[in-house]
Image: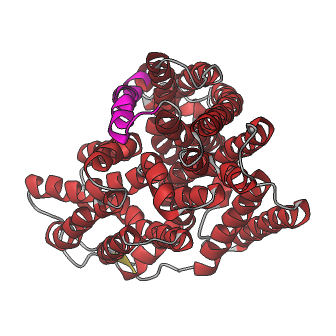
Amino acid sequence: MTEINAPAPQTQAKQWWGLAVLVIPSTLLFMMLTILFLAAPKMAADLGPTSAQLLWILDIYGFVMAGFLVAMGVVGDRVGKRRLMVIGAVVFGLVSIAAAMTTIPELMIAWRAVLGLGGAMMLPSTLGLIFVLFAEPKARGIAIGVWAGGISAGVALGPLLSGLLLEVFGWEATFLVAVPVMALVAIGAPLLLPEHKDETARIDIFSALLLVAALLGIIYGIKRFATQEPVGPTAGLLIAGMLVGLWFVIRQLRSVNPLLDVRLFANRTVSGALTVFLLSAAALGGVYSLFTQYLQQVQGLSPMQAGLSIIPAAAVLIVVSTLSPMFARKFRPGSVIALGLLTQVVGYILFTQLDAGTGLAFVIASFVITYPGVAPSMALTTDLVVSSVPPNKAGGASGLATTVNDLGISLGVAVIGSVGIATYRSKITDTLPDGVPPEAAVVAKTGIDGALATASQLPDAVGASLATAAQQAFTSGLNITGLVSAVIAALAALIAATQLRHIRPTGETASESSSTEESVR
């Protein structure tokens, strides 16, 4: 039975202040998915990670948060959503300080994983408390729209904030920026937000561990392929990850109260919308992480200049995210999403044409075309999924949508980013200039950061040749990831146009669209 320990805020003003306490940390949690993209070169120079370790630093946060989101939603029901949100904020703030003081790559990976756990404690509570805070449907719809917009803005503006911080401070500031935000949550939540519990909720931590183990096993196997590790153990890891994933699915199907209701995928709208968004976000995540490094390591921009270069694309993304629900009222949502993805395909093809000497204007234009294409899927997915299931399954559907939202970008960084690394290693091995010492060659093959650092210590002619070879090899990796992402985005567009074609424009009346509605089988 649901218990509300504190009454919902009585004044409209207090409700909107409470919404701010929910939206601001949500924006920051998704900002942390991308904020290290621009900081990666400076962090790599200080910590000395391998390319594989750097990818782990970038994406372990998203994987752990995605793996525990649904489980922490249930924990919040049991112990109190507001209480868990405050605990998560304290954990996130303290670990951010610890991460900023870290000098060991392996420890940085561990801290980023704990940050993901802290984020998973907070994010489900932010959406859940919106439903508690706003009883009136119209106000609730506005609040959810603001919350979703905040998440989109966080993904878009992470590198920009990173560039601003790196211009004045070191990479440590990209972690410390979270501390005042989490202090605000820890103080403001008890003052402005009601508590909400469901003591009958069942916590299935083992299922959550199975999900995280499956994700990490598969991703670690892919990373090993990218770094050319022995095939036998690598294939074993992939198989083990898939088997654990199968175990997770079987456990959910047999459970009366599953952690993740995989039966929802029987609904064509749910499966279609989530698949489309997962593919589109993954395609973008891989290119995005390499593109921010390309701006600095190949184009030679400072972090501030790189961040400013992203502003046009981020601004268009926010505008398109805002307009997408309006377009969906007049046109079929599947068509709106497909059109955005086809625009992405054009942008990814432009990425295949970049080289080390491409003019900055063309580079920025390519990203402006590419980036906003994910906006319709990002803006419409949650509403499509939640509105397509019975009310008693809306909570599980929103949990699925939020998990996929987080998981997509992290998968792109891990999987497609690994394709870029593998291409770089292959190209740099074939194009190493004569005169590079063997030990310098080994470092150069670990990644462009090591190559450029090593080049600066070699005689001028040899160093310049090594730097040029590394930049060309890295750009080749970006070209290949652009091609891979173009194929993935095209597949997502096809799925959107076919699997979601039955969904009528959202502006139509219920009687006009009732014949297209589906329920979970």
As drawn, 374 above or below 111: above
Where is residue 467 shown, x and y percent of the image?
Answer: 60, 37
Identity of the residue drawn at 72% across and 69% down:
248
**As drawn, which residue projects farthest toward the front?**
459
Q: Quadrant of residue 448?
A: top right
- Please state the total of marks drawn on the protein image: 0
Q: Quadrant of residue 92?
A: bottom left
Identity of the residue drawn at 63% across and 30% down:
496
Comparing 483 with 84, the one in front is 483
As drawn, 437 above or below 340: below
Dominant secondary structure of the magenta stretch?
helix
**As drawn, which residue projects farthest toward the right?**
232
Identity of the residue drawn at 41% across and 33% down:
301
Q: Can the viewer see residue 135 in this picture?
A: yes
Tell me which segment is drawn in magenta: 300-327
207 left or right of 123 in image: right
Identity of the residue drawn at 51% across and 21% down:
366
Q: Can the viewer see residue 2 in this picture?
A: no
Comparing 36 with 274, the one in front is 36
Where is residue 245 shown, x and y percent of the image?
Answer: 74, 65
182 left or right of 447 in image: left
Comparing 84 with 115, the one in front is 115
Comparing 130 with 445, the one in front is 445
Residue 325 included in the magenta stretch of the image: yes
282 left or right of 401 in image: right
Where is residue 336 shown, x and y percent of the image?
Answer: 51, 23
